[in-house]
Image (spheres, grey):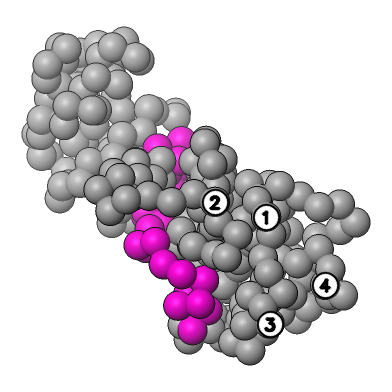
Amino acid sequence: MKYNRIYQDIPLQCDMEITLDAGATHHLARVLRCRIDDRIELFNGDGCSYTANIREISKRQTVVRILSQSTLEAEPTLDIHLGLPLSKGQRMDFAMQKAVELGVSAITPLKTEHTAVKFPEKRLQQKLQHWQQVIISACEQSGRCRLPLLHPLTSLEAWAQQQTRYGIVLDPQADNSLASLPAPEEEAMLHLVCGPEGGLSNSEIKQLRQHHFIPVRLGPRVLRTETAPLAAITAVQILWGDFR
């Protein structure tokens, strides 16, 4: 049976009785209308799921007892590190949420030449906390037991200079298609980057090529900045990952 999944950033083990945090209490009591003796599933990012029984529940507090532990994971077989340029409105949230559902292992928000979004430091920290919650919610929904890493905002140049064994940059003008590329070596992380709403500049594409990124087109149509990475993640999962 599938239970409502809740993330808790604390150690978990069988026969443990814990009080859930305020966010989980609000979601269970006010949104899902859970009751005493209902069962839920907890996870904390350690790779396990924990079935728990609700012992107390109110608008202010929820107490559960952990009944069992499972090591059955929904983690991807292909490690994908997504470089995601900042975008406006809800597009960034949407792209992050769906990327987690599709199986990325890490996400780095990027500043590029054509990035139109800028945050002061305080606002940026709030955004990072918000994006972390987007990732948590996506894991709750999709059955993942490990949280993908959310890296700090960085420049495309700095991100490209990381040690990359296999990198792909999405470029509508590229000659290569994904199907024409060899599969990544076993246990190699695939670095994938797309352009912002204004696209990547020629100099940025050149810079990425110098760091062993392969330019790839996804087809004859130009995709939006929130659509392109999701299409690419799906395609590489079908070609080399756990969608095969």
* Residue highlighted by disc 2: 116
Quarter placement of the N terminus: top left
Mark 4 = which residue? 174
Q: Which residues are magenta?
A: 137-161
Identify which residue is drawn at 67% across, 55% down: 198
Query: In this view of the protein, can residue 190 be seen by the observer?
Result: yes
**What is the C-alpha distance between the residues marked 4 and 1?**
17 Å
- Helix, strand, or loop for circle 1? loop
Q: Earlier in the sequence, mark 4 or mark 1?
A: 4
Marked residue nearer the N-terminal end (2 or 1): 2
Residue shown at the point (21%, 35%) measured from the top left: 67
Visible residue check, residue 49: no
Amino acid type, mark 2: Ala
Name the side, left or right, on which 145 lies relative to 231: left
Tell me what residue is drawn at x 34 percent, y 14 percent: 31
Asked if residue 141 is among those painted magenta in the image, a careful observer would answer: yes
Mark 3 or mark 1: name the one nearer the start of the chain.
1
Choose top left, top right, bottom left or bottom right for residue 237. Answer: bottom right
What amino acid is labelled 1 in the image? Gly
Which amino acid, mark 4? Ala
Looking at the picture, tell me which residue is in the foreground, 150 or 92: 92
Q: Nearer the viewer, residue 99 or 194?
A: 194
Pointer 1 residue: 198
Report the mark closest to the observer, 2 or 3.
Answer: 2
User: Type of residue at label 3?
Assistant: Lys
Tell me whether the residue at label 2 lies in contact with that at label 1, contact meaning CB atoms closer than 8 angstroms.
yes
Task: Quarter of the image for the C terminus: give it.
Answer: bottom right
Q: Are marks 3 and 4 in contact (CB under 8 Å)?
A: no
Q: Which residue is mark 3?
A: 206
Q: Position of residue 226 (x, y in %)?
A: 63, 46
